[in-house]
């Protein structure tokens, strides 16, 4: 159901924004909570994993493995690509000719945009 999927994406975005508000938290703590917030926003949360690559450092969810079923968004800081956020399905969920909803790419772009700040 499309409405259910949009609600999941909104909940995910709200959680990410809430976690990014804590200016005193360590970067690793913030990234860990952002990575935990992402899978529930996707269509197949039980096989969804994420990672953030920033300035050469990699922060990943515990079961992250890079697969061909990947979505990414650049993290841009001061007009320079400082890294990216990636989402992978760790199992084949290919149905109906597409893997990710266009709205999920928008969600990831938005999360990357907030991380850029």
Image (tube, helix red, strand yellow):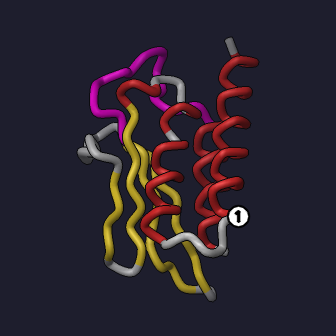
Look at the image and say whether residue 90 sits in the magenta stretch: yes
Numbered disc total: 1
Q: The residue tagged with tag 1: helix, strand or loop? A: loop
* Residue 60 image offset from top left, x and y in percent: 33, 55
Whether 95 is drawn above or below 53: the answer is above
Front-most of residues 11 and 86 = 11
In the image, the segment drawn in magenta is 88-102
Please, what is the dominant secondary structure of the magenta stretch? Answer: loop
Left or right of 16 on screen, residue 39:
left
Q: Please, which residue is most extreme toward the top here?
A: 1
> Image point 66% across, 23% down: which residue?
5
Q: Residues within 10 Å of mark 1 (few under 14, many from 20)?
A: few
Residue shown at 60% from the left, 38% from the top: 104
Residue at 47% across, 62% down: 29
Snapshot quadrant of residue 24:
bottom right
The quarter of the picture where residue 90 lies is: top left
Q: Position of residue 58 (x, y in %)?
A: 32, 67
Q: Quadrant of the C terminus?
A: bottom right
- The residue wearing badge 1 is 21
Would you say 51 lies left or right of 114 here? left
Measured from the top left, where is residue 75 in percent x and y?
Answer: 54, 70
């Amino acid at each position: 159901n499309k409405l259910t999927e949009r609600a999941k994406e909104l909940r995910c975005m709200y959680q990410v924004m809430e976690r990014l508000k804590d200016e005193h938290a360590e970067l690793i703590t913030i990234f860990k909570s952002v990575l935990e917030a992402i899978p529930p926003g996707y269509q197949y949360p039980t096989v969804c994993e994420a990672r953030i690559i920033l300035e050469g450092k990699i922060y990943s969810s515990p079961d992250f493995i890079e697969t061909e079923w990947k979505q990414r968004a650049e993290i841009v800081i001061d007009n320079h690509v400082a890294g990216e956020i990636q989402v992978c399905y760790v199992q084949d969920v290919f149905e109906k000719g597409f893997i990710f909803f266009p709205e999920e790419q928008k969600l990831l772009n938005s999360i990357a945009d907030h991380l850029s700040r």
